Image (spheres, coloured by chain):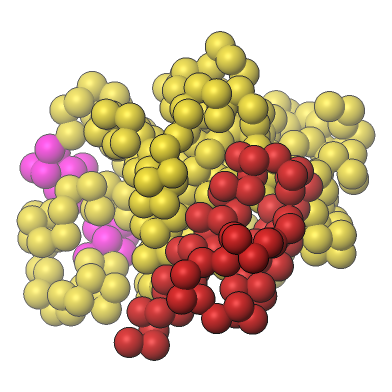
C-alpha cells in the first residue's frame, strides 16, 4: 500500500509494553498463568490493583462491595476476566490518547466483541479459545498507535470513514495513510508479542493461505463483530476474505453462536462504558 | 442484498425484517451482496436481530 503520511512509525517514540501486560502474556504463552501469580503481579502495581478491584466491584459484575482483594476478584469473577481487564487497563495506560480524537469506549467494545466471536469460532474448531480471545481483543492495536502518534491523521481517516460510510481500512487507503495493520505490526514487534499474535494484528483484514488458523479466525470474528452492531452500527465491515472462508469452512450454527455471543455482550455496552469511565 | 418472499423468516413482521435487512446490507459495506457466503452472514445476522426483538416482546 502506498503511504504518504505518518509512514515512519518505526521512528515514533513507541511506548514500552507495560510490565504487567508483558508478564501476563509470557505466562499465557508458557501456560503458567495461575490466580496466585496474577494476584502477586498486580499486587506490585497499586494503581492497577486499585483499578482492577474497582472494576471487579462495579455493577458490571453485580458484586459491588464484595471483592476486597485481588484473590477474591479472581475467585469471584474468574481468572480470565481479571486477566482481560488487566490487559485492557495496561494497554490503555501505555497508549495515552489526546482528548477528543478517539472513541475509546467504541474501540474496546469492538475489541471485546471480536474477542468473544473469535473465542466462539475457535472453540467450534476444538481449540480452547483463549488465544483467539486475546488476538481478537488486540487485533486493532494499530489504530491506537496511529491515534496516539498521529492524532490529526487519525481524525482525517475517521472523518473520511464517516463521510463516505466506508470501512476504516478503506478510509486509510483513501487518505493515503499508514494502515492500522502496519502500525499494529510495528507495535507488536516493538513489544515482542508472540508471532501468531503479531500476525493476527498485522494481517487480520486479508490473511494469506499460509497464515495460521488464528489469523483467519480473527478475520471472520472481526467481520461478525461489525455485523452485530445492528441498528446502532455506523462502522461497515471489511471485505470477507476468501482464503479465510475456505480455511475455516464455518458451519451456520457456529456463526450463529458467535453472533449471539457478541449481541449478548453488546446489550451490556452501557455497563461497559460506565465501567471504563470509572478507571 | 435482495430479499425474496421465500427468504422471509417465519413469524417475523415483514416491515421490521426489511428494516433489518437494509441495516445489515449497509453494515456489509463493500462486500458483494450477491456472494452466497455474504448472503448467509447477512441472513444469520438478521435472524439474530429478529430473535432479540422477539425476546424483548415476551
Residue at x-position 68% and y-position 61%: B4
Residue A160 against residue A206 in the figure, above or below: below
State the image coordinates of residue A166 (x, y, percent, origin top left): 79, 54
Q: Quadrant of the N terminus of chain A?
A: top right
Rendered image quadrant of residue A182:
top right
Does any portion of residue A29 appear in the rendered image? yes
Chain letter, red = B
Query: Residue A41 in magenta?
Result: yes
Residues rendered magenta in the picture: A34-53
Residue at x-position 56% and y-position 49%: B41
Q: In this view, does A28 lie to the left or right of A139?
A: left
Chain letter, yellow = A
State the image coordinates of residue B28 (x, y, percent, origin top left): 69, 53
Q: In which quarter of the image is the C terminus of chain A?
A: bottom left
Residue A124 against residue A43 in the figure, above or below: above
Residue at x-position 43% and y-position 44%: A252
Rendered image quadrant of residue A37:
top left
Residue A11 against residue B17 in the figure, above or below: above
Report the magenta stretch's main SS: helix
State the image coordinates of residue A71 (x, y, percent, origin top left): 9, 55
Residue A209 against residue A200 in the figure, above or below: above
Rendered image quadrant of residue B36:
top right
Query: Residue A29 in magenta?
Result: no
Amino acid at each position: 500500500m502506498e503511504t504518504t503520511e505518518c509512514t515512519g512509525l518505526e521512528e515514533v517514540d513507541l511506548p514500552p509494553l507495560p510490565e504487567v501486560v508483558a508478564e501476563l502474556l509470557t505466562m499465557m504463552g508458557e501456560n503458567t498463568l495461575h490466580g496466585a501469580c496474577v494476584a502477586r503481579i498486580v499486587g506490585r502495581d497499586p494503581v492497577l490493583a486499585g483499578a482492577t478491584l474497582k472494576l471487579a466491584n462495579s455493577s458490571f459484575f453485580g458484586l459491588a462491595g464484595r471483592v476486597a482483594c485481588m484473590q477474591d476478584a479472581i475467585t469471584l469473577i474468574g481468572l480470565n476476566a481479571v486477566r482481560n481487564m488487566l490487559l485492557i487497563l495496561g494497554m490503555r495506560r501505555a497508549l495515552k490518547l489526546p482528548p477528543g480524537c478517539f472513541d475509546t469506549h467504541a474501540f474496546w467494545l469492538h475489541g471485546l466483541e471480536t474477542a468473544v466471536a473469535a473465542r466462539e469460532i475457535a472453540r467450534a474448531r476444538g481449540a480452547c479459545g483463549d488465544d483467539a480471545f486475546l488476538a481478537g481483543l488486540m487485533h486493532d492495536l494499530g489504530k491506537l498507535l496511529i491515534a496516539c502518534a498521529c492524532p490529526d491523521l487519525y481524525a482525517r481517516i475517521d472523518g473520511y470513514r464517516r463521510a463516505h460510510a466506508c470501512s476504516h481500512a478503506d478510509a486509510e487507503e483513501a487518505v493515503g495513510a499508514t494502515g492500522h495493520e502496519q502500525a499494529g505490526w510495528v507495535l507488536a514487534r516493538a513489544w515482542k508479542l508472540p508471532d501468531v499474535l503479531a500476525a493476527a494484528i498485522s494481517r487480520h483484514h486479508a490473511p494469506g493461505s499460509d497464515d495460521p488458523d488464528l489469523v483467519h479466525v480473527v478475520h471472520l470474528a472481526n467481520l461478525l463483530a461489525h455485523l452485530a452492531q445492528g441498528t446502532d452500527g455506523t462502522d461497515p465491515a471489511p471485505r470477507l476474505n476468501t482464503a479465510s472462508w475456505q480455511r475455516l469452512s464455518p458451519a451456520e450454527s457456529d456463526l450463529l453462536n458467535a453472533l449471539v455471543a457478541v449481541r449478548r455482550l453488546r446489550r451490556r455496552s452501557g455497563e461497559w462504558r460506565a465501567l471504563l469511565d470509572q478507571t | 442484498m435482495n430479499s425474496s418472499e421465500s427468504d422471509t423468516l417465519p413469524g417475523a413482521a415483514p416491515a421490521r425484517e426489511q428494516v433489518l435487512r437494509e441495516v445489515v446490507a449497509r453494515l456489509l459495506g463493500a462486500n458483494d451482496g450477491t456472494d452466497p457466503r455474504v448472503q448467509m452472514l447477512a441472513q444469520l445476522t438478521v435472524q439474530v436481530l429478529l430473535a432479540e426483538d422477539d425476546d424483548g416482546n415476551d
